[in-house]
Image (cartoon, rainbow, N blue to C red):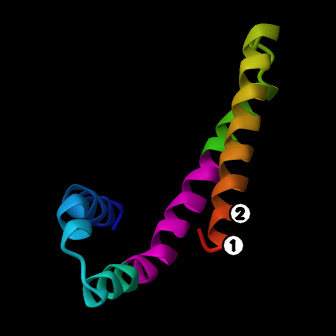
Amino acid sequence: MTAAISAILALIEQLLPLIVSSATSSTIDTIINALTNMLPFIIQEVEALVTPVKNIIAALSATPATNASQLAQLQALDAQVDAAFATAAAATDSGQ
């Protein structure tokens, strides 16, 4: 499903200059409806990827072989994942 959604979004992005230059209300409705229908699958994929990444970070952080520098990198990565997910969730919640 991810590959299909990515392909559709990439196609829309490539055609966007043409779409915008000759857009009609009907065309915009069609694209909005397509994005609305795909959004639950997009969110599901993001959520599906966050958990494994967080699990990997947690496992590596708990490994005795992880040195202080690596631990700091993992903590920064964990914060980055949290921030990106929070930003994506906020954008979705606010209708952006």
Quarter of the rendering containing residue 27: bottom left
Residue at point 36% right, 62% down? 2
- State the CA–CA distance, disc 1 to disc 2: 5 Å
**Mark 1, other Cα within 10 Å: few <14 / some 14–19 / many ≥20:** few
Do the residues under discs 1 and 2 have CB atoms within 8 angstroms? yes
Foreground: 57 or 27? 27
Asked if residue 35 lies left or right of residue 40, the reply is left
Q: In this rendering, would 59 be left or right of 15?
A: right
Residue 44 picture location, percent across and down: 54, 68
- The residue at 55%/58% (across/down) is 46
Q: Which mark is residue 90?
A: 2
Q: Can residue 11 be seen in this view?
A: no
Q: What element carries label 2?
A: helix
Please say if 72 is above or below 81: above
Q: Where residue 94 sits in the image (x, y, percent)?
A: 69, 71
Q: Name the residue under label 1.
A: 93
**Magenta span of residues:** 35-52
